[in-house]
Image (tube, grey):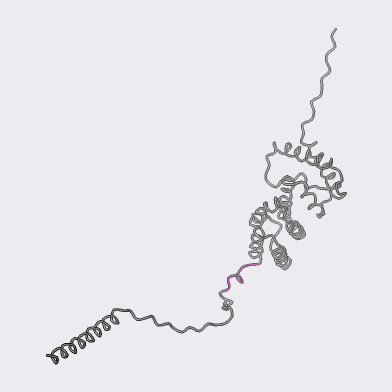
Amino acid sequence: MKYIVALAIVIFLVRIDFFLGQIEKATKRFTPAPPEIEATVVQPGRQLIPVSQDESLKQSPRDVFLSLLGSFRVTPDSAIRERAMEIFKSHPTMFSSKLDEELEAQIFRWQELLHNNEPEVVPFLLNLMSILQGENLLMLKRFFALWIDINLDNFLTAYLKTKDTNCMIITTFGHNIPEEEKLNEYYDREDALKEYLARPNIEPGQKTLATNCLLVLGLEISKLAPAAAPVSEPEATP
């Protein structure tokens, strides 16, 4: 009897090992193998772009310059201004005397910079004035004239650095103004200049420029203002 029990126990243990082995095989069969990691070689340094594929080298100096004007609107710092003027001075004929509409569009997008009185705007405008000619120069003066109505103080401080000491720009408008509205616009500028000159302790340079602006504006107003109707003398009664 003891031998029968012992034999049964041995058979039971063998069966358990058999079943455990089958379970292990099944587990390995249905478990996905881990992905093989392919060894990669990390190349030091930056990837070099062939000259034939570098799009920036395909741009003309004019395209690069206009792109820098757009960048200056977002980030008005000296580095962008200096880079743009470096290109302009190397290619001074990339803009002719005829109005370049793309140049005009880029410049007039700087209006927010005038509102914020960004310090780098003035040297940039002065740099451009020294090179631009014809209609493009007139366009730049129209943009500068926007500052008169945005902030007269900042305009006078900035425009004092130009060669227009007689302030002929005072009759210029940045945007098209109907003829019938010009006189009222001139009156508004005249009032602003008189109010400015009435302040105490004005810097001599700004005071001289503002006075010249007022004189030129007064002459223009006298041309546009209707002549006063003559007052008729009352008829004598017999």
Judge from the rendering whether residue 120 lies leftward or rightward of residue 54; answer left or right: right
Q: Is residue 140 magenta?
A: no
Residue at the extreme top of the image, as rendered: 238
Residue at the extreme front of the image, as rendered: 2
The vertical placement of 232 against 194, above or below, is above
* Residue 132 visible in image: no
* Of 173 and 115, the residue lying toward us: 115
Q: Quadrant of the N terminus?
A: bottom left
Question: How far across and how far down the image is residue 211, in percent?
Answer: 85, 44
Question: How far across and how far down the image is residue 87, in percent?
Answer: 70, 67
* Residue 152 visible in image: yes
Residue bounds of the magenta highlight:
54-60
Judge from the rendering whether residue 15 lies leftward or rightward of residue 170; answer left or right: left
Who's the residue at 31% across and 79% down the image? 31
The vertical placement of 205 against 17, above or below, is above
Who's the residue at 58% across and 78% down the image? 46
Q: How many numbered badges does the structure rendering display? A: 0
Question: How far across and how far down the image is residue 41, in percent?
Answer: 50, 84
